[in-house]
Image: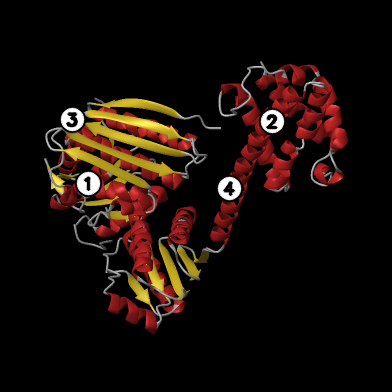
């Protein structure tokens, strides 16, 4: 029986993105996700962590192992208190770029996960929550 | 203060004996489980239940006192499902504990009709909850087994054939839905790595319809193969499919397509051959033609 | 900060990426390769990513940048050994890395580089 767990990882420097990848990879393997699904969620985590660092000016990632409803899953929540995203529709469109020319990778990450939620407010910050189910 | 925990603890052996005795041969299922294993299951369940009730908690099975009971029942449901018991049979096994427990309660609370009634009520509800818990677990077990079988079948229906050194063929048959295409993609790409094949021919003669979604899936497979260093050729494009593709405005990009597997094979040979030719020319010191 | 080593084999440079690179390390590799192509007069670069379990958009763009920069410097680049799970994920992410030549393994990659003759022309994959 996989226990539920929550851990919070800081995202403040670029090596934190590597840490996020490694922790997400470990949890994904623990709940028995297939290799392809593991790769997808870790890659999504990398994209979103980088967004948090670069666009959001730093924040954190909450990693939750889910198992309460009998179905195992991994939920990741990336939050920052950065500038927020003014126009979500544009941001979610493929190829949107902001800041130093790097795309926000939101639409791509969305395709790599099962559930995708985003809440953002200009001047207050952004929170992206993604889930990959087994 | 309920006397149930005390009664279960003190009379555990008697309850166990009566339980085994009362169990009908239909319930015993000696074809699926031998007598020793069954007795061990009963003994363990009764022991854990009795211990859990010592906490005084007799209404809810979701908390800490019943953690070991739940774990035991989960394992029990899983193992019974694998042996071939239906969820109902496993639940009935749990429910069958009621009879010997009630019999015990009747003896211990004799002359006290109100107390007896209350005890039977409480015990009945408790065992009901435990039985229903096993049903939930059984269902999930069976679902997991079915989905594993489905996965196996999907993989079996994706036969990748090695046509030549460095050339694979994947004849697809039947409809391509999202789940199937995932498996197909993964199987093909893995075979590409395993065999070191630089060309893969995906034959869709046996695919009845190609809509936008299927075309997208094919595109993704081809693009992924390219990233790995292999080329894909799509063969078996029937006239109707060609029409559909054009009509839908679906771009197959610059993927090579051929009407028949044989044509695709010739193209594949050329592709393999050309790199062989040029490296031979190089090693002979001759200029590349 | 440690840097990814670049091996020189005659006119070719060989890079094997085996660590989970943080962004600065990837950028350093880009710089080092560009410099080395010039200083070694290399006509081809082979990047072996067969150990990489994750290639995200940053690494993907790094590979595309290296390919583009080497082309400007009249050298060819081949990326070899991408794992199936990585390829599937990159495609889903929306990255197809056009302009990056690929091969299944180091051996086939070297064949491709030799055949490319060092010029940015030659059998283009995309």
Residue at the disc numbered 2: B121
The tag earlier along the polypeptide, 2 or 4, is: 2
Quadrant of the rendered structure where residue B96 is?
Answer: top right
Quadrant of the rendered structure where residue B59 is?
Answer: top right
**Secondary element type, mark 4:** helix
**Front position in the image: B52 or B203:** B52
Residue B258 at x, y percent in the picture: 38, 77
Residue A24 at x, y percent in the picture: 38, 34
- Separation of disc 4 and disc 3 at Cα? 41 Å
- Separation of disc 2 and disc 4 at Cα? 35 Å
Q: Are marks 4 and 3 in contact (CB under 8 Å)?
A: no
**Front position in the image: A77 or B17:** B17
**Front position in the image: B283 or C4:** C4
- Residue B190 is labelled as none
Q: Are marks 1 and 3 on the same chain?
A: no
- Residue A81 is labelled as 3
Say left or right for B196 vs B283. Answer: right
What count of labels does the image hold?
4
- Crowding near the residue tagged with mark 4, few <14, some 14–19, many ≥20 C-alpha atoms within 10 Å: few
Q: Are marks 1 and 4 on the same chain?
A: no
Q: Are marks 1 and 2 on the same chain?
A: no
- Crowding near the residue tagged with mark 3, few <14, some 14–19, many ≥20 C-alpha atoms within 10 Å: many
Residue at the disc numbered 1: C61
Residue at the disc numbered 4: B144
- Separation of disc 1 and disc 3 at Cα? 27 Å
* Chain of the residue that carries numbered disc 3 in the rendered image: A
- Crowding near the residue tagged with mark 2, few <14, some 14–19, many ≥20 C-alpha atoms within 10 Å: few
- Separation of disc 1 and disc 4 at Cα? 39 Å
């Amino acid at each position: 029986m996989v226990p539920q767990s929550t851990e919070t990882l800081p995202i403040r420097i670029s090596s934190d993105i590597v840490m996020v990848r490694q922790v997400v990879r470990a949890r994904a393997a623990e709940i028995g996700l297939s290799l392809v699904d593991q790769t997808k969620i870790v890659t999504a985590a990398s994209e979103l962590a980088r967004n948090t660092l670069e666009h959001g000016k730093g924040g954190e990632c909450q990693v939750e192992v889910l198992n309460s409803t009998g179905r195992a899953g991994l939920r990741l929540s990336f939050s920052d208190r950065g500038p927020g995203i003014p126009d979500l529709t544009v941001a979610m469109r493929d190829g949107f770029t902001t800041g130093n020319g790097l795309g926000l990778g939101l639409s791509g990450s969305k395709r790599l996960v099962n559930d995708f939620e985003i809440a953002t407010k200009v001047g207050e910050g952004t929170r992206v929550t993604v889930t990959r189910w087994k | 203060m309920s006397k149930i925990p005390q009664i279960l603890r003190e009379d555990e052996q008697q309850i166990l004996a009566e339980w085994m005795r009362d169990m009908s041969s239909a319930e015993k299922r000696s074809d699926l489980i031998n007598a020793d294993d069954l007795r061990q299951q009963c003994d363990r369940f009764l022991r854990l239940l009795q211990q859990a009730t010592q906490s005084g908690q007799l209404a809810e099975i979701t908390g800490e006192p019943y953690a070991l009971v739940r774990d035991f029942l989960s394992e029990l449901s899983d193992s019974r499902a694998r042996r071939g018991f239906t969820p109902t049979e496993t639940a009935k096994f749990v429910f069958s504990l009621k009879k010997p427990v009630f019999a015990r309660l009747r003896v211990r609370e004799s002359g006290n009709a109100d107390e007896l009634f209350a005890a039977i009520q409480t015990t009945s509800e408790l065992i009901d909850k435990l039985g229903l818990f096993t049903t939930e677990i059984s269902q999930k077990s069976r679902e997991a087994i079915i989905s594993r079988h489905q996965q196996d079948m999907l993989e079996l229906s994706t036969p990748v054939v090695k046509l030549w050194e460095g050339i694979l063929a994947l004849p697809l048959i039947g409809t391509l839905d999202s789940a199937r295409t995932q498996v197909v993609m993964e199987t093909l790409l893995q075979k590409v790595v395993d065999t070191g094949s630089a060309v893969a021919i995906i034959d869709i003669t046996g695919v009845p319809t190609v809509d936008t979604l299927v075309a997208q899936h094919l595109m993704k497979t081809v693009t992924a193969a390219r990233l790995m260093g292999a080329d894909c050729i799509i063969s078996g494009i029937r006239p109707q499919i060609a029409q559909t593709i054009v009509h839908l405005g679906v771009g197959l990009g610059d993927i090579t397509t051929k009407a028949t597997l044989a044509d695709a094979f010739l193209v594949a040979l050329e592709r393999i051959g050309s790199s062989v030719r040029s490296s031979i020319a190089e090693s002979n010191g001759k200029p590349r033609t | 900060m440690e840097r990814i080593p670049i091996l020189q084999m005659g006119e070719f440079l060989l890079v094997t990426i085996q660590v989970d690179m943080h962004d600065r390390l990837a950028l350093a590799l880009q710089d080092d390769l560009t410099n080395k192509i010039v200083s070694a007069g290399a006509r081809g670069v082979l990047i072996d990513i067969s150990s990489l379990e994750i290639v995200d958009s940053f690494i993907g763009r790094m590979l595309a940048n290296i390919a583009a920069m080497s082309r400007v410097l009249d050298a060819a680049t081949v990326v070899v050994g991408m794992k199936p799970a990585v390829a599937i994920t990159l495609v889903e992410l929306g990255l197809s890395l056009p302009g990056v030549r690929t091969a299944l393994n180091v051996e086939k990659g070297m064949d491709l580089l030799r055949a490319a003759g060092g010029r940015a022309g030659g059998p283009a994959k995309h």
